[in-house]
Image (cartoon, grey):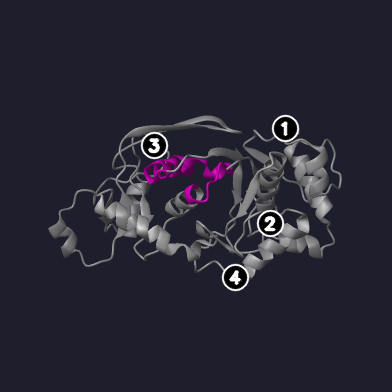
Amino acid sequence: MGIRTRFAPSPTGYMHLGNIWVAFLNWWWTRQQRGKIILRIEDIDQVRCHKEYISAIQEDLTWLGLDWDEGPEDVYAYGPLQQSHRYEIYKAIQKKWEKEYLLYPCFCSRARIHKISSAPHLGEETPTYDGHCRNLSESIQRSMHKTPSWRIKVNKEEISFDDMFCGHQKKVMEACSDDFIIFRADGAVAYQLAVSADDGAMGITHVFRGNDLLPSTFYQIYLLERLGYKVPSYGHLPLLVDNTGVRLSKRQHGITVKELREAGISAEQIIGQLLFWAGALKTVLPVSAETALKNISFDSCQYINKSIIKADTI
């Protein structure tokens, strides 16, 4: 099948420099490896996601010179490339795992989850679950007068992987405390299941994304293995931060591609700045995506192993 990567934005607003940073590095590496790129729209949050931003994402990528091989405009053997159109696929997984007793309904309120997640857990840095609903009898479950979320029963095991940029990573998944939600009480699929099921079904071989998502990788590997898919290679990229150390986000002004275009900034200026931040250029120069692909090796990036990169204004 060859190399297959994906850029998977959420259409909750216009793309900003932090999004483009990941999109460009993914595109640049994949094209130099002669791989294929999948543009997947992660719109499971139907409250915050809007159709207008899907078109804007495609327009911005095209303007920057970043193309893709499979996108949301078509339907493929694995289904559509918009997560909101893949709900039945996720639901089928839930039903199958329910029958196999791999899941259990969780009736815990948000207040209770917040309370136990905020409490100290033997030095753990990440929130844990106390297994309150793990072994409820069927009679107790039937007596509950609320719609449950669904958690996967985690078996204790060590999960490890070698990240392309962050080195060796490992975590011991613990029964009960690491049981995580795959379907919410409101019926929405959880991010971890949607991403894992999609990466597996779409044959993704390499995942590029920000290093803020590195902790999620262990849970996604756990799901991929239970779904019977081959686990992709992961490359977690440094986060772009402003002069105060705050990660670039949609909340900040003047950093969306739309705003930069309207301010007269060219696509070549943006690509050149991204190459400079990655350490592939010693000075900021306007460079087209095509020129970077043909003349600058991805391996020339000197700063790709950092945890953060201070992004000066273009």
Tell me which amino acid carries mark 2: His
Is 11 above or below relative to 28? below
Residue at position x 65%, y 34% in the image = 306
Q: Is residue 299 magenta?
A: no
Compute the Cα span from label 2 to label 1.
25 Å
Residue 314 image label:
none
Residue 51 image label:
4
Which of the marked residues, 3 or 4, is nearer the chain's N terminus?
Answer: 4
Q: Tag 1, which secondary structure? A: helix
Residue 124 image label:
3
Q: Position of residue 26 (x, y in %)?
A: 66, 45
Which of the marked residues, 4 or 1, is nearer the chain's N terminus?
Answer: 4
Which of the marked residues, 3 or 1, is nearer the chain's N terminus?
Answer: 3
Indicate which label's residue lies in the foreground, 2 or 4.
4
Which of the marked residues, 2 or 1, is nearer the chain's N terminus?
Answer: 2
Is 146 above or below relative to 31? below
Circles 2, 4 touching at the beta carbon (< 8 Å): no
Which of the marked residues, 2 or 3, is nearer the chain's N terminus?
Answer: 2
Q: Which residues are magenta?
A: 200-228
Residue topped by disc 2: 16
Q: Is residue 116 left or right of residue 266?
A: left
Q: Residues within 10 Å of mark 4 (few under 14, many from 20)?
A: few
Q: Position of residue 233 (x, y in %)?
A: 55, 37
Q: Is residue 112 visible?
A: no
Tell me which amino acid carries mark 1: Asp
Compute the Cα span from label 4 to label 1.
36 Å
Compute the Cα span from label 2 to label 3.
33 Å
Tell me which amino acid carries mark 4: Lys
